[in-house]
Image: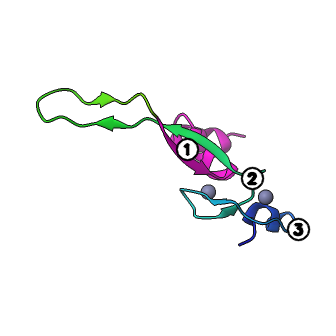
Amino acid sequence: MKCYQCLRSGTTQEAAGLCHHCSAALCPEHICEVQDSATVMHILAPSMELPIRARILLCSVCKAALDQPSGEQSLFENTKR
Ligand SMILES: [Zn+2]
Ligand SMILES: [Zn+2]
């Protein structure tokens, strides 16, 4: 599979992974790796965060979208004149 981000910019690069959110194939240059906390849920105790964190691969578009403090707020700011 070829990197989707590269295809969009007119080049081809062999993909190394997939975006967790939009499933676009990504080359190592375009993969954004983020850490996701793993938690254990207990019925009688509060959920506990585990020391080893999970990995999520994202494309730059989805990472930027998910990093927004509030989707509604930044959408509002973009429409400001
Ligand atoms: Zn690429
Ligand atoms: Zn994506």
Q: Position of residue 54 (x, y in %)?
A: 47, 41
Residue 62 drawn at (x, y percent): 61, 51
Residue identified by numbered label 2: 28
Query: Which of the four quarters of the rendered structure image does ligand 1 lie in?
Result: bottom right
In-image side of 40 versus 24 (left or right)? left
Q: Quadrant of the C terminus?
A: top right
Residue 10: mark in rendering: 3
Read off the magenta span: 53-81
Mark nearer the viewer, 2 or 1: 2
Question: Which residue is tagged 1?
Answer: 66
Q: Position of residue 46 (x, y in %)?
A: 21, 27
Q: Which type of secondary structure does the marked residue at label 3 adopt?
A: loop
- 41 or 4, which is in the foreground? 41
Q: Which label's residue is closer to the chain start, 2 or 1? A: 2
Report how far apart the C-alphas of labels 3 and 1 lie in the structure: 26 Å
Residue type for callout 3: Gly
Decide if ligand 1 comes within 8 Å of the CB at mark 2: yes
Question: As drawn, is 9 to the left or to the right of 54?
Answer: right
Taking the spot 78% from the left edge, 50% from the top edge, the residue there is 29
Q: Compare marks 3 and 1 and give the one earlier in the sequence.
A: 3
Secondary structure, mark 1, is helix
Label of residue 53 in the image: none
Identified by mark 2, the residue type is Pro
Residue contact between numbered discs 2 and 1, judged by CB atoms under 8 Å: no
